[in-house]
Amino acid sequence: MQDIVDRVREITRENERLFAQLIAGEHRFRGLAKAVWKVQEEERRRLARELHDGLGQTLTALTHQLERLQQKLAESGAAELAERLADPVELARLALDESRELSRLLRPPVLDDLGLPAALSWLARTLEQRTGLAVALSLDGLDEGLDPDLATLVFRLVQEALTNVLRHAGVARAEVAVRRAGGALELRVADAGGGFDAAAALADRGPATGSGLRGMRDRLELFGGRLDIASSPGQGTVVAARVPLEETPP
């Protein structure tokens, strides 16, 4: 009997050791995955800056030179040549606008300069101007400083959720609410669109649906958060997330 007891104790200690190793491995994996995510965001920031400061400035100079040339031709009486420059000038302006838009989409400067509330307001305005999607935005308790990584996470989640509304919901309006509550940030994105099978979209098996929901869930888990989706065909969709707060130091 004593041999059995000793063996059970040995098995228990071994299980505890293996469990501790499993927890440590999970922590290391999460730390590595979070580091990779931060590197990706830093690369987005770098590319956005290069687009704005490099290509953007070059296109600005090109546009101004074409406009001055067009004006000089018109003043010298070469109206026909000046008219021919109208299309190149317009193309240069379009290229400049597109490079600026791409730079902002990669990493909006307002997120780093003014914080999460300003960035979400910019995102809502931009989507309505570019796509016609009206976004009703409700922000509560975000005036105090947030951890920059957490602010980036919430911005990306809202951006991804609204992209899904545009691609799949077939509606002209969405609601976004972000609030500080009980030591956490709570996020809610709702639409009255066609809905979908949320369980199938989040399932680990089978091909991805292109909605990005798994990626949203995985990024939230890196920060100790949780993603909940309420949706069914014809009943609209509510994407909700809750993530613990990491306050910025005073």
Image: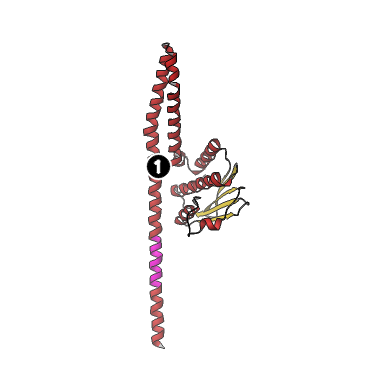
Question: Looking at the image, which is closer to me, 19 or 193?
Answer: 193
- Is 48 contained in the magenta span? no
Residue 62 in percent (x, y) is at 38, 26
- On the image, the x and y values in percent for residue 18 come to 38, 70
Image coordinates for residue 117, horizontal then vertical, percent: 52, 42
| Residue 156 left/right relative to 36 | right
In this rendered view, identify the residue nearer to me: 56 or 241: 56
The answer to which quarter of the image holds residue 7 is bottom left
Which residue: 40% across, 39% down?
48
Check residue 23 for magenta coloring: yes
Q: Secondary structure at mark 1?
A: helix
Residue at image position (45%, 18%) is 83
Q: Is residue 117 above or below residue 15?
A: above
Q: Quadrant of the N terminus?
A: bottom left
Out of 245 and 124, give the one closest to the viewer.
124
Outermost residue toward the bottom? Answer: 1
**Crowd class of label 1 (few under 14; some 14 to 19; many from 20; radius 10 Å):** some
Determine the main secondary structure of the stretch shown in magenta.
Answer: helix
Q: Residue furthest top?
A: 77
Q: Position of residue 9 (x, y in %)?
A: 40, 80
The residue where tag 1 is placed is: 45
Task: Please say whether residue 79 is visible from this viewpoint.
Answer: yes
Q: Nearer the viewer, residue 19 or 70?
A: 70
Q: Residue sitting at 43 percent across and 17 percent down?
A: 82
Q: Residue 139, located in which quarter of the rendered image?
A: top right
Total labels drawn: 1
Residue 175 lies, with reference to residue 65, above or below; the image says below
**Magenta span covers which residues?**
16-27
Vertical order, 73 against 59 (above or below): above
Q: Amino acid at mark 1?
A: Arg
One can see residue 145 in this view: no
